[in-house]
């Protein structure tokens, strides 16, 4: 019951009427919304002229950040236009391709053959819920040969994932404070205490308009190359490193990768929560009369599990949420800002070199400028050297400069300059203004002047161009020849007979050598180009040989170690990718099994491959704890036998 204060100056009747009218207005708004919804379903046709459209969802309850499938099936048309989905703030949508769904059948009824044909097309999508609650999947319009069809609205429940003791996802900025334009390294670490498979990251900050997000150039340590993986994080492949780390007093297997975020605006900026969805190993199921019993994950690490003894891995769908890191971003001060400031924020050093240091006026001189600074140097650009008055006073400088190349922690620029006069003594210092975040002031990095020796250009005459020496003709006189043209006439007596060298007789054979060599070279080049025209075919034919070579190298790893299982898994994945003509990165097991079925590989071989895949993934992510789960030599033997059988059964 509401208590109405006497100081309001209104009677209880008037106040009650206001409350009633407010409640009535809310009810009418809801009824109007429901009416609009019903009218939209009424006037937006889902079928027309024997054609209809329907939506199928993979599930109706998901975690925030978990990917799920949606299929839009069009019946009655096998070539419709791609659906146009309404914009939604609740989902991120990714088109997963489309395929025809046409079929025909023949039925004989009372001696009459009746042929039934059904045409259709299926569009597949992957959706990720961005927030928790009951979310509306908006309608989509599909243009077919009969008109425009509209899908019905669907609701799905998104649940916020909870923290797990065995899985942690953490994000950390390289600095808690920054300036606008200052590159920040964001480190994402996924801690795992159990085996996982089929993981998928959802990183909302990749589309955050407040930042410019770029890839971090990971410097791979050649001594630990096997620790680096290529994973898909939603914005393309990223290099991640697998390692053993301690988190809050507990040791985990960790997967770590980094991104560079450059703030575009000032303020206290909080990153939204990221998630990683995956299938976590929950235990094993034993076959036989005692089926239905589940072993704990600890048994997987500690007990013996001989290959093919009826124990089946049980995986559970999980989502690990991240923290929400905060960074305080400040505006760059206007006081003391240099006129040629290009927006560089951080701490930079610059050095220069000129070659050659001895030249003539107008000769090209290559000026090399190297810039060192923060981890991210892709955005670094030199000030326009053609506008540098100290440089253009003595040198001709092109208006354009070649783009720089990043190599490790240095970005190198090259520019060609030409001295204008012989009195030029040096290349002046090249300046690079930047804002120093430590001191909070603008600074300028400068190169050292480069001494030069410039000589005047010698005048080139026509005789120099012809390469002849000047003859002294001062004492010569013109003589008159009285014999006329007859003076140059000689008879046959002056001719002298000479024998040709022996090799001259073989000149026809010698003339055939160059074209013959050219033809051989042309044929060889054509054969090589033909072999290289289809690299996938080369990999297809060499898949078994490459797999055997990779397996022979696995024996050098310590049996039972995580590297041992990871190497075997990598060899399997590369073999299957070559046979299926696909890229090894991101090759999912379900996709492999489906493709092998199309190539008529027996189901028994596919089941054995699935078990082998699961064991290798478990060993790879389990690390050194996976010591007695399976005899490593038996796994390798099983892999060799299985691959040979797949090779024979592949069609």
Image (cartoon, helix red, strand yellow):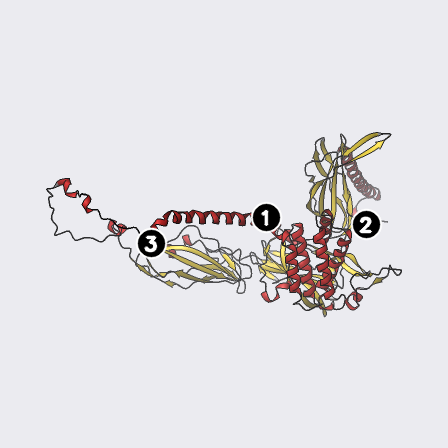
Marks 2 and 3, the one that precedes in the sequence: 2
Residue at horizontal 77 percent and vertical 31 percent from the top: 50
Q: Quadrant of residue 81?
A: top right
Marks 3 and 1, the one that precedes in the sequence: 3
In this rendering, the count of numbered labels is 3
Which of 615 and 347 lies nearest the eye of the viewer? 615
Tell me the element at label 2: loop
Q: Quadrant of residue 429?
A: bottom left
Is residue 597 visible in this depiction of the protein? Answer: yes
Within-10-Å neighbours for mark 1: few <14, some 14–19, many 20+: few
Is residue 271 visible in this depiction of the protein? Answer: no
Q: Are discs 3 and 1 less than 8 Å apart at CB? A: no
Residue assigned mark 3: 362
Disc nearest the viewer among 3 and 1: 1
Disc nearest the viewer among 2 and 3: 3
Please tell me the numbered disc located at residue 534.
Answer: 1
Q: Position of residue 298 (x, y in %)?
A: 79, 66
Residue assigned mark 2: 5
Q: Position of residue 209 (x, y in %)?
A: 62, 50
Residue sticking out furthest to the right: 289
Q: Position of residue 48 (x, y in %)?
A: 75, 31
Asked whether, in this view, residue 169 is left or right of residue 451, the answer is right
Marks 2 and 1, the one that precedes in the sequence: 2
**Mark 2 → mark 3, Cα distance in angstroms:** 94 Å
Q: Position of residue 519 (x, y in %)?
A: 47, 47
Which of 464 and 88 lies nearest the eye of the viewer? 464
Disc nearest the viewer among 2 and 1: 1
Tell me the element at label 1: loop
**Mark 2 → mark 1, Cα distance in angstroms:** 86 Å
Q: Are discs 2 and 3 less than 8 Å apart at CB? A: no
Residue at horizontal 20 percent and vertical 53 percent from the top: 470
């Amino acid at each position: 019951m509401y208590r109405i204060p006497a100081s309001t100056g209104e009677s209880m009747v008037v106040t009650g009427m206001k409350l009633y009218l407010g409640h009535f207005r809310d009810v009418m708004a809801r009824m109007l919304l429901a009416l609009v919804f019903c009218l939209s379903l009424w006037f937006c046709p889902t079928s027309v002229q024997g054609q209809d459209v329907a939506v199928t969802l993979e599930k109706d309850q998901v975690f925030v950040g978990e990917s799920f499938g949606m299929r839009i099936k069009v019946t009655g048309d096998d070539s419709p236009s791609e659906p146009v989905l309404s914009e939604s703030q609740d989902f991120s949508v990714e088109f997963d391709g489309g395929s025809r769904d046409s079929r025909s059948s023949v039925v004989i009824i009372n001696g009459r053959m009746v042929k039934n044909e059904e045409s259709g097309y299926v569009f597949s999508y992957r959706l990720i819920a961005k927030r928790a609650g009951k979310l509306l999947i908006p309608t989509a319009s599909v243009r077919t040969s009969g008109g425009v069809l509209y899908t019905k609205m669907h609701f799905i429940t998104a649940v916020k994932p909870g923290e797990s003791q065995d899985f942690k996802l953490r994000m950390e900025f390289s600095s808690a404070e920054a300036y606008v334009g200052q590159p920040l390294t964001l480190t994402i670490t996924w801690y795992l205490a159990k085996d996982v498979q089929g993981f998928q990251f959802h990183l909302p900050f990749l589309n955050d308009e407040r930042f410019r997000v770029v890839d971090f150039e990971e410097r791979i340590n050649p001594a630990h190359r096997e620790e680096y993986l290529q994973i898909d994080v939603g914005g393309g492949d990223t290099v991640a490193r697998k390692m053993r780390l301690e988190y809050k007093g507990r040791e985990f297997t960790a997967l770590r990768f980094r991104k560079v975020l450059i703030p575009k605006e000032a303020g206290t900026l909080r990153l939204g929560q990221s998630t990683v969805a995956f299938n976590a190993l929950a235990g094993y199921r034993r076959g036989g009369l005692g089926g239905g019993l589940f072993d704990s994950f600890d048994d997987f690490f500690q007990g013996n599990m001989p290959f093919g003894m009826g124990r089946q891995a049980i995986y559970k769908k999980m989502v690990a949420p991240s923290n929400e890191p905060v960074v305080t971003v400040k505006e760059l001060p206007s006081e003391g800002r240099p006129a040629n400031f290009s927006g560089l924020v951080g701490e930079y050093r610059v050095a220069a070199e000129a070659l050659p240091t001895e030249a003539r006026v107008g000769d090209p001189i290559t000026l090399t400028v190297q810039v060192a600074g923060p981890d991210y140097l892709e955005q670094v650009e030199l000030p326009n050297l053609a506008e540098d008055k100290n440089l253009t006073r003595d040198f001709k400088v092109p208006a354009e400069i070649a783009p720089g190349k990043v190599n490790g922690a240095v970005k190198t620029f090259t520019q060609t300059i030409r001295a204008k006069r012989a009195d030029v003594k040096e290349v002046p210092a090249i300046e690079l203004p930047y804002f120093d975040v430590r001191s909070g002031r603008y600074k300028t990095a400068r190169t050292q002047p480069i001494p030069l020796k410039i000589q005047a250009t010698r005048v080139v005459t026509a005789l120099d161009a012809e390469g002849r020496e000047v003859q002294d003709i001062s004492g010569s006189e013109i003589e008159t020849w009285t014999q006329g043209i007859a003076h140059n006439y000689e008879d046959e007596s002056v001719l002298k007979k000479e024998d040709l060298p022996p090799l001259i007789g073989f000149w026809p054979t010698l003339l055939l050598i160059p074209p013959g060599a050219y033809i051989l070279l042309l044929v060889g080049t054509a054969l090589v180009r033909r072999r290289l025209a289809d690299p996938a075919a080369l990999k297809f034919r060499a898949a078994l040989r490459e797999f055997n070579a990779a397996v022979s190298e696995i024996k050098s790893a310590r049996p039972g170690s995580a590297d041992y299982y990871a190497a075997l898994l990598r060899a399997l994945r590369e073999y299957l990718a070559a046979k299926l003509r696909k890229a090894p990165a991101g090759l999912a097991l379900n996709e492999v099994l489906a493709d092998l079925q199309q190539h008529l590989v027996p189901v028994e071989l596919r089941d054995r491959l699935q078990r082998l895949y699961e064991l290798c993934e478990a060993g790879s992510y389990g690390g050194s704890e996976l010591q007695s789960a399976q005899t490593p030599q038996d796994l390798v033997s099983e892999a060799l036998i299985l691959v040979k059988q797949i090779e024979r059964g592949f069609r």
